[in-house]
Image (cartoon, rainbow, N blue to C red):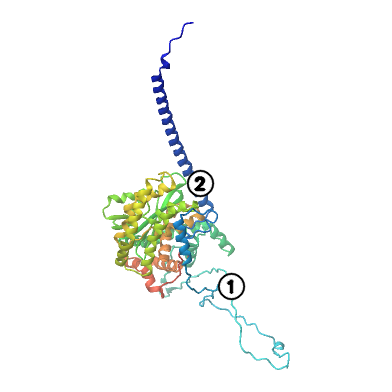
Amino acid sequence: MSQAKPSSNNDPQKLKENIILLKNCIHELEKKHQEEIKKKNEQISTLYDQLKLAVHQRFGKRSEKLNVDDRQANLFDEPEVSKAEQEKVEEADVSLTIPAHTRKKPGRKPLPADLPREEIIHDLTEDQKQCDQCGHELHKIGEDISEQLDYIPAKLKVIRHIRYKYACRSCEGNVKSAPLPKYPIAKSIAAPGLLTQIIISKYQDHLPLYRQEEILKRLGIDLHRGTTSVWMMKIGQLMEPLYKRIQMQLIYSDYLHADETPVQVLRSNGKRKPSKSYMFVYCTGARSSPLILYDYQSSRSGKSAKDYLEGFKGYLQTDAFSGYNIFHEDNEVIQLGCWAHVRRKFFDIVKITKTKGLAHEAVERIAELYQIETEADEATFSNDERKALRLEKSKPLLESFKTWLDENHVQTPPKGLLGKAMSYALNHWELLIRYLDDGKLKLDNNAVENAIRPFALGRRNWLFCGNEKGAKASAIIYSMIETSKANQIAPEKYLQYLLEKLPYCKSESDYEELFPEKYKSEHCNNSSEMTTHSDGSI
């Protein structure tokens, strides 16, 4: 049998080259596979974090307060710590001292002294005033007083304007009568008190007009919601000249906050029905005599804000909405960032993470910046003193935080929640540190966000505006209410005052007399006419 010739495929050198080529192919495939696994894992982690955050936002607590201990959250999931850290914690625990304090005993608060009192005397009968032991008459030695709070239901009254008519008997002419006072709404049955109550119920207490219609029916008054809706639009028109003058006062200030929130309008010109429009809110950054103004716009375009603030020169503090980038072209407007938005993005991660990590560290670093501001507030520093304190303490913390962000950002997946939070801070860093330039500037945009909250609460109840006129009227009325609250003026008193005085206004000086700070100086005996809590409620 003849022996077969060796094939070229059996060439050892060729086989060796094929093996090397095959190994390289396997290595490349494995590398590609590992990259795909890493990418998928990052996507899964991001989606999982988003799911946890969405569940927490739907069912969890909305508070953004950070518990320093966090013992309850980590009760069954304690993070691993090094031996040195453990010794440091134990040493700190040993040297911890609790300062003495006086604990307030909880109890019922006294009823306001200015409320009217109705006294009901509970006395013994004549037979009971005899001593059971000796039969002598009992003598009064004192009294026990207890108080209850009662409610008097609202009452409506009709004001009849009676005008006597006079005429000349000789010529049977020259008929005269006293003129009627001017009303907020001409030829309307609504007096200023009723209009004030309807306004406060809707815009302050978030009670829609159709619910007020049912309440008035129980009092025997048939007042359709369509009528009260027209009244609100006419009140907006009545207040518009005053609103315009307060707007000019706002534009003349040198420091503003701005934000916007959506509002649904059923019938909007040139837009599909129903349409999504926006309510822009502006407030002055001054700590005294603040102004808060709402402005309805059919779109979220930054041009809306630029047109409204035409002529403004100074600092404008906003969130990172790109629409406000239109002010980049204006050299007279200096933009600021918001540290509350930076903190919120890191805190969203803290909410869904049991063990402490980079997000916790970022929140703690930001808390140090706020602590410095608290220190300045408690010491009632002037703007110059506050600026000096920031340059001394805040600036080094900011530089350290920037270095920390740069180092950790490159090692963090960019599409995850943590990566996005770091990117947000780095992308807006120049705007975030600009508050160091002036002591009057604030760290965040919370002032205007707090001003938006009453509108957002009302929107949950009345849901939409019928048309653009109603939305514009609502913007004007909300402006008057929130500005009065910001100046510690009871809004119901200020609104009734405006409804009584506005019909008589003719000149510029007449409207200036109705400005909130003017009203406060003339009609508020105390420095504060009302008490405002930290959440904005009264």
Q: Residue 210's image quarter?
A: bottom right
Rendered view: 223 above or below 275: below
Q: Secondary structure at mark 2?
A: helix
| Observer able to see residue 212 | yes
User: Residue 433's spot in the image, x, y percent?
Assistant: 32, 56
Between 155 and 126, the one lying in front of the other is: 126
Amino acid type, residue under disc 2 in the picture:
Leu
Disc 1 packing (10 Å; few <14; some 14–19; many ≥20):
few
User: Residue 200's spot in the image, x, y percent?
Assistant: 48, 63
Nearer the viewer's eye, disc 2 or disc 1? 2
Rendered view: 19 above or below 474: above
Disc 2 packing (10 Å; few <14; some 14–19; many ≥20):
few
Query: What residue is shown with label 2?
Result: 51
Residue beneath the point at 45% across and 41% down: 42
Q: Secondary structure at mark 1?
A: loop
Between 116 and 166, the one lying in front of the other is: 116
User: Residue 188's spot in the image, x, y percent?
Assistant: 47, 62
Do the CB atoms of the residues marked 2 and 1 lie less than 8 Å apart? no
Q: Residue furthest left?
A: 331
Query: What residue is shown with label 1?
Result: 150
The mark that comes first in sequence, 2 or 1, is 2
Q: How many marks?
A: 2
Q: Residue 365's image quarter?
A: bottom left
Using the numbered discs, state the Cα–Cα distance from disc 2 to disc 1 in whole angstroms: 49 Å
| Observer able to see residue 65 | no
User: Residue 52's spot in the image, x, y percent?
Assistant: 51, 48
Between 168 and 23, the one lying in front of the other is: 23
Amino acid type, residue under disc 1 in the picture:
Asp
